[in-house]
Amino acid sequence: MTAPGWRPGGRRPDVPSMLRVDQAGEYGATRIYAGQLAVLGDRHPAARLIAGMALQEELHLKHFDAMLADRGVRPTLLQPLWNVAGFALGAATALIGPEAAMACTAAVETEIDKHYAEQLASLGDEEPELSGTIREFQAEELEHRDTAIAAGAENAFGYPVLSAVIRAGCRAAIALSKRI
Ligand SMILES: [Fe+2]
Ligand SMILES: [Fe+2]
């Protein structure tokens, strides 16, 4: 019989670091969509989809802001960087075109889905409230990915490269926000 919460390797999850990276990711997501909407305005059909996803990201961010405050966890020191980098990524992809903007969302959400799945696995049943939140948000991120693909993400010019570059950037951002 194993102790509750036991997991291979026996390492306890670092919950403050998890909250920090999640808040950073949701913050970054709001900045990406802000950049896209700044370019696309509110008339483009893609803008309506993006505005809907952006609203959910705002709610995700508010939730993690509150959890950080509750538990006295400081946000990542890289927030100013994610502010600028997120907005720039959103604006740049939207400038290429609406399909590239959608390719950006599909790439980001693919990595976020993996990230949340890893967190859920490492949390086990130790933090039911946090796990519940992550599960709920993960489902919405997958909806965003599906929305983006349905809106033509894969038709974006240079999709495989664009997607690979953005996914690598996300993984780097996640790794940095866990530590800093
Ligand atoms: Fe989100
Ligand atoms: Fe999302």
Image (cartoon, rainbow, N blue to C red):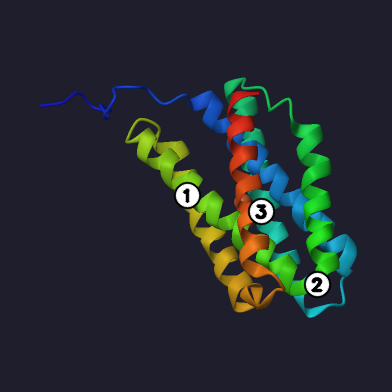
Dividing the image into 4 quarters, which one contains the N terminus? Answer: top left
Of the 4 image quadrants, the one containing the C terminus is top right
Is the distance from the Cβ of mark 1 to the nearest ligand 2 atom less than 8 Å?
Answer: no
Q: Earlier in the sequence, mark 2 or mark 1?
A: 2
Q: Please, is residue 35 above or below residue 49 in the view?
A: above
Indicate if the residue with disc 2 has its beta carbon within 8 Å of ligand 2: no
- CB of mark 3 near ligand 2 (< 8 Å): no
Give the quadrant of residue 56. Answer: bottom right
99 sits left or right of 3 in the view: right
Residue 160 x/y as whole percent: 61, 66
Q: Nearer the viewer, residue 110 or 164?
A: 164
Q: CA distance from mark 2 to mark 3?
A: 16 Å
Q: Which residue is the site of mark 2? A: 97
- Element type at marker 3? helix
Q: Is residue 67 visible in this depiction of the protein?
A: no
Above or below: residue 167 compared with residue 71 = below
Q: Quadrant of residue 43?
A: bottom right
Q: Which residue is mark 1?
A: 114
Left or right: 23, with 4 as reference point: right
Give the residue pinned by disc 3. Answer: 166
- Give the distance between the C-alpha atoms of the residues marked 1 and 3, in whole angstroms: 14 Å
Residue 114 located left or right of residue 90: left
Say above or below: 161 vs 23: below
Residue at 35 percent across and 22 percent down: it is 11
What residue type is disc 3 on?
A: Ile
Callout 2 environment at 10 Å: few (<14), some (14 to 19), or many (20+)?
A: some
Camera-nearest residue between 100 and 50: 100
In contact (CB < 8 Å): disc 2 and disc 3: no
Q: Are marks 2 and 1 in contact (CB under 8 Å)?
A: no
